Amino acid sequence: MIRLVICAGQRAEGLHLRKVIDAYATHHGIFNIETLVMNSREEFGKLLALLKPDFFDIAICRIDGRCAEMSLQEIADSATNMKALTPHTRFVFMSSDDNHALCAYRAGGKFLPLPLVQEEFESVIGKAILETVRARRKFFAIKSGKTVVNLNLDDVSFIEVGKKGPIVHLPEHTVVVTRTTLQALYERLHQASDSFMKVGGSFIVNLENMSSASETSAIFGDGQTIILPTRLRKPVAEALRTRCLRQ
């Protein structure tokens, strides 16, 4: 799962940008993106303090608006301090004032002028998304019928036992059936990535793509849900929480 956060001056503006990002991702066949919209970078700073460094792969923050009374140096310092909370996150700073480009540069981020222009969006945010996808991409080959299918591990939400073999669930409700045992598949997956967890004898879940674990079920970023065995609900929730704190 690739996680983005948009810290806009107005929520409506952030929601609009989210739609643009979703459309861009769909056009490029990227389905494992989770986007959160916040009202301000102050909220973002508080969220990072509660969660962990580098919880987000990309952060898009507006640095003008309510801070018009701040000097360029103060804005640059604010942006630098924010990036220090999560040093490996790719930052894109937005502003309607081109003078703020220097602030973005000083903070080690990219700059996107407002109002939003499609070409500039693609060259800054679009490029950051594609670079993140390439950095995270991991391939995994499995046999399905008489063919070999190359999967991207980041796209796997969960795997469940089926009548003809394990069923691999991918974005957009796409599935791949493979003829092997769930245990054998788990051993291969766990060797490739520690984000995979075996849940009883029926499921393998990808903690990286799990958005939450409730009292009864696990919910994934694309909306797919599975009912967890009673005795394993607490261990799954704890594993998800531990992974989030560790990353």
Image (cartoon, grey):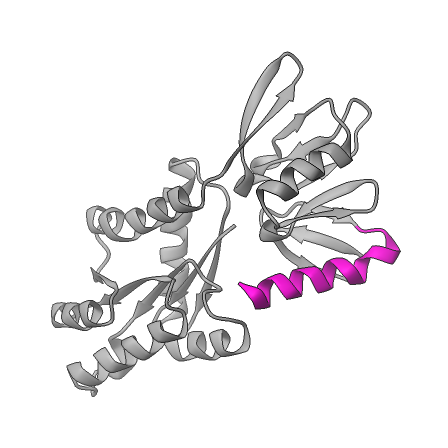
Q: Quadrant of residue 7?
A: bottom left
Above or below 201: residue 117: below
Instruction: Name the residue: 63% across, 48% down.
Output: 223
Q: Work out whether residue 127 can be spotted.
A: yes
Looking at the image, which is closer to me, 191 or 182? 191
Position in image of residue 121 (x %, y %): 25, 51
Q: Work out whether residue 23 can be spotted.
A: no
* Residue at the left extreme of this rendering: 99
Q: Main secondary structure of the magenta part?
A: helix
Position in image of residue 4 (x %, y %): 43, 58
Position in image of residue 239 (x %, y %): 69, 60
Q: Quadrant of residue 155?
A: top right
Instruction: Name the residue: 16% across, 81% down.
Output: 72
Looking at the image, which is closer to me, 189 or 15? 189
Instruction: Name the residue: 58% across, 41% down.
Output: 192
Instruction: Name the residue: 65% across, 65% down.
Output: 241
- Left or right: residue 47 versus residue 86 is right
Q: Which residues are magenta?
A: 228-247
- Left or right: residue 247 versus residue 98 is right
